[in-house]
Image: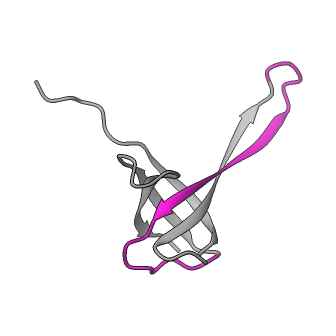
């Protein structure tokens, strides 16, 4: 009985690449406000594991949720899109 759930994948922009094998990625999402029915832009910052240190600030990247790597890192870099 294999599980049918897959790991979460998100797209985001690298906003910091100053750490060793870590980058900070901003994930933007657009939603409608429940009361005012306006479009609201929200963003979340997550720390991502970048083993080969290839992502630079400003890159658009695809990341994947994984088991905890450290205290703050729960995502890993899949690919650099642009």
Question: Start and end of the magenta stretch?
Answer: 34-57
Residue 39 among those drawn in magenta: yes
Work out whether residue 66 or residue 4 is closer to the camera in this orientation and state it.
66
Q: Position of residue 46 (x, y in %)?
A: 58, 53
Give the quadrant of residue 23. bottom right
Q: Residue at x 53, y 56 (%)?
A: 11
The residue at 46%/73% (across/down) is 21
Name the outermost residue toward the left.
Answer: 1
User: Where 54 sits versus 67, above or below?
Assistant: below
Q: Quadrant of the N terminus?
A: top left
Which of the two residues, 80 or 71, is positioned nearer the viewer here? 71
Residue at the outermost top position: 35
Kindly identify the residue that appears in the image at 51 percent across and 65 percent down. 61
On the image, the x and y values in percent for residue 43 come to 71, 48
43 vs 76, left or right, is right
Q: Quadrant of residue 33?
A: top right
Q: Position of residue 16 (x, y in %)?
A: 64, 72
On the image, the x and y values in percent for residue 3 come to: 20, 29
Residue at x 45% of width, y 81% of height: 54
């Amino acid at each position: 009985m294999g599980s049918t759930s897959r790991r979460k994948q998100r797209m985001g922009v690298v906003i910091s690449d100053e750490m060793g094998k870590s980058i900070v990625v901003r994930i933007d999402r657009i939603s409608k406000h429940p009361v005012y029915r306006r479009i609201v832009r929200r963003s979340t910052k997550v720390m991502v594991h970048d083993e080969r240190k290839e992502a630079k600030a400003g890159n658009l990247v695809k990341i994947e949720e994984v088991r905890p790597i450290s205290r703050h890192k729960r995502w890993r870099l899949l690919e650099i899109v642009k």
